[in-house]
Structure formats: structure tokens, C-alpha cells
Amino acid sequence: MIVLDRCAVSTVDSSGTEHATGHVVVSADGRIASVGSGPAPRPYESHTYVDASSCLVTPGLINTHHHLYQWATRGLAQDATLFEWLTTLYPVWRGLDDTVTHAAASAGLAKLALTGCTLAADHHYVFPSGGGDVFNALVSAGRRIGIRLEAIRGSMDRGQSDGGLPPDNLVEDTEAALIATEQAIGDYHSTADDALVRVAVGPCSPFSVSRELMTGAASLARRHGVRLHTHLAETLDEEEQCLAENGCTPTEYAEQLGWLGSDVWLAHTVHLSSDAVKRLGATSTGSAHCPTSNGRLGTGIAPVRDLLDAGAPVGLGVDGAASNEDGGLVVELRAALHQARQRGGPRSLDVRQALWMATMGGAQCLGRADSLGSIEPGKVADLAVWDLSGMDYAGIADPVAALVLGTAPPLKLLIVGGEVVVRDGVLQTASTDELARDLSAASLKLQEAAR
Ligand SMILES: [Zn+2]
């Protein structure tokens, strides 16, 4: 059991309950035993007692969109549009194998843990022939670092000869992709409410996936009761291609294919008409908002305020590190707030709404709001304990403003289901020096293979 005492607490429950000086008690089974104002109830002598004064405790942050393998291909195509960026990187990704994937995913997950993340969704859609079992390499990296993983078995089956964007040698056969996706669900998916690994189904995007794979993946996911994820409406180039090929917008195309619904969350959703926003709200289709990646690629600013007002779940996403070299999660709260305000003015999003998106909004997108995303008795104890004791935060009027608007704070603790993954800013589950060495070797291997 762990007692966090004398801390500020932002529970992110449905009432937005906060405690200026309070406590959180974690039970031996990794659940929240109690949370409230004032000192922790005694006796707690048999527990691990943490004096968390000068700390802010929030739910662990949830990352709803990533491509961890891209940690091995950072710094490339710096000034490109999305389609230029993809066509530059596809040949590099052709060299991806299980060793590179494990090194990149381990480093990427370590960075997420060190920036407050307790659950990460990773969309893996590159399966080069001869690359070994890259999906297993991803899942084992999640178990190694110790944060929860929504492992999305992605796919592409529409190469250039079929009018798609990826080269033919990087796509899978439609039927083979569906069989491998079903196999991944059987091998790794858990329905437990405190599952460390869940599997979702994720054909990559309309411009790299056939209509048959989109519909086949949707029915496969629904047959197994797992969630559906894809990229949608990220750029105007995508919209133009969709209008030319299908005579409709990406959102209309997704709806035709059965890809709107409360079991679906979509990455980006930047270019949406007001009707599309209403459809996402009416169908409770989630959005993974990735502000830094959208800024890096200059794709536009997603209508987050409109989506929230329409009742659509919105979470935050880091996106792959090839379009967001920082790869940390907490900085996305500020990026989301800034982008919303650039689009709609200073009252478009406040610091608590940014924190809500990074916690409960993410939990809703991933279908885990009953057990994760807020600090409430009985819920799973995924907690970020932010250390606000330094000069950067001295005297600041509001700890949540410190978290969202100030310097990204170090973590006193990151707790996943009662297990300590980060302590005093140090990852407890792996050596970051070793992760850096492996990542350098993996990046070099990919770059040399692409020459
Ligand atoms: Zn993405």
C-alpha cells in the first residue's frame, strides 16, 4: 500500500473535485482506497508513506496515438508536408525489424513514462517481410517499461500500383493482414479492467488501405469486441484525394465504411466540416488530438472546442517521434491549449480542460473510463505525482496552471496499478543509458539499410 500525503490533488472526477492539501491512498491490489482533503487517515504505519507536500497528484496521463517504431527515424524530412514526409520515410521503414522495433518502442515508452504517461496507444502498421515478429517486439517493450499499452495492430494493403501512397513492397496482402490482426487479438488482448495490454484494430489511413480492408477490419474488431482506430482528416491533400476517388469527404467515407461509432477513435480529425463535427458527436466517435505533430507537419489546427461541445470524446496524442521529436506527453497539454486558443480565442480551452483531455478524455477514447482516467475509490491506481518544489514553480497560484502552462515538471512518482515505474525522476524498470545505446544502434541500422 502507498500513502501519498500533504499533496494537492486534481481528481478529474465528473465534478472536477480538487484538494489544495489532501491525500491519496493506494491499496495492496493497486486500486484507489481513498482520496480526500487533509491528512491521510491513520493508521498507515504498515504502508509506504510518501510526504508529497509541494506535489500535485493527477491521474496518469493517457496517450491516445503514437507510432513508437518512429523513435528510430527522428530528424528526417523536417520541412515536408505529410505526403512528402511519408514518401521520404517509407523506404527507411522498409528496414524495420523486431530488434529495431523493440529498441525504439522501449525508448519511446520510457520517455512517455518520464513525462507522466501510464497508458499509451501505439499504432503499428509497418510489417516488412523478413522483419520478424515486430508486434511481439512492441508488446514486450510495453511489459519491460511497465506502463499500459493499447497495442493497435495496424495494416496497409494499398501500394502505389493500386493508387496508394506507400511503395508496393511495404504493404501486406489484404487477407493476410486480417488474419495477422485476428492472431494478435488472440495472442495479446485482455478484457480485464486493469489489463496491461489490450489490442485494437487499426488499418492505417484511407490513402494506404483498401475499402475491403477497412470494412473487413471493422467487422473483425466488432466480432471480437475490440476497438477500432485509424488516421482521418489529417490534411487537405487527403481530403482532395478522397473527394476525387470517392466523391465524399474523409468523414463521410468513414461513415460509409462503418467507421463511426462509440468503439472508434480517430487520429487527428483536423479538417472537419461543421456537419462532420456533429456526426462525430452524435456517434460518440473519439478523436486523438496531436497538436505538436500537427504543428510540425503544418497540417492545420483541429476543432477541439467544437468537438467537445458536440459531445465527442477527445484525448491527446504524441504521434510518432518522426513528426514530434520530443516524444513526451505532458507538453501536449500546453500545445493543445495554445492551439485551441489560436483558433478560437482565450476562452476556447482552459488548463483543467486540457488536463481532462489528457486523462478522462483519453480513457473515453480507449473505452476505459470505468476503471482509468480519474482518481476515485475503486478505480485502478494509475497516478502521476508531479514535483512542484523547484524554482520553476515557486509561488505559483495554481498547481494545475504550473503543470499545463509552466515548465514540464519532474515526477516524484509515476504509479501504474500500484507499481512504481518512476521515482524522483528516474525510470525504475530499465536503464535509460542502455535504452539510448540500443536506440542509437537501431537508428543507425535503419539509416544504413536505406542507403
Ligand atoms: Zn499517426
Image: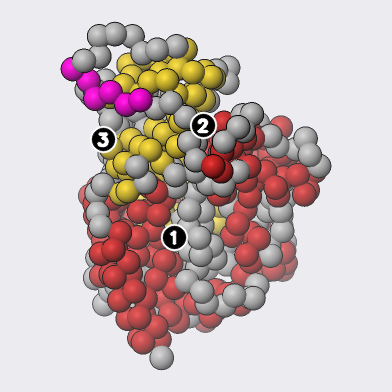
Secondary structure under tag 1 reads loop
Secondary structure under tag 2 reads helix
- Ligand 1 neighbours mark 1 (CB distance < 8 Å): yes
- Return the disc, 3 or 1, that comes first in the chain's sequence: 1
- Characterize the local packing of mark 1: few (<14), some (14-19) or many (20 or more) Cα atoms within 10 angstroms: many
In this picture, residue 365 sits left or right of residue 254:
left
What residue is at 60 percent from the left and 43 percent from the top? Answer: 406
Give the spatial CA distance, label 2 vs label 3. Answer: 21 Å
Q: Nearer the viewer, mark 2 or mark 3?
A: 3
**Nearest the camera: 309 or 326?**
326
In this picture, residue 164 sits left or right of residue 196:
right
What residue is at 44 percent from the left and 44 percent from the top? Answer: 410
Q: Amino acid at mark 1?
A: His
Q: Which residue is mark 2?
A: 360
* Stretch of the chain drawn in magenta: 46-51
Labelled pair 3, 1 in contact (Cβ < 8 Å): no
Labelled pair 1, 2 in contact (Cβ < 8 Å): no
Quadrant of the image occupied by residue 412? top left
Q: Which residue is mark 3?
A: 419
- Return the disc, 1 or 2, that comes first in the chain's sequence: 1
- Characterize the local packing of mark 2: few (<14), some (14-19) or many (20 or more) Cα atoms within 10 angstroms: many
**Nearest the camera: 298 or 262?**
298
Q: Nearer the viewer, mark 3 or mark 1?
A: 3
Q: Amino acid at mark 2?
A: Met
- Return the disc, 2 or 3, that comes first in the chain's sequence: 2
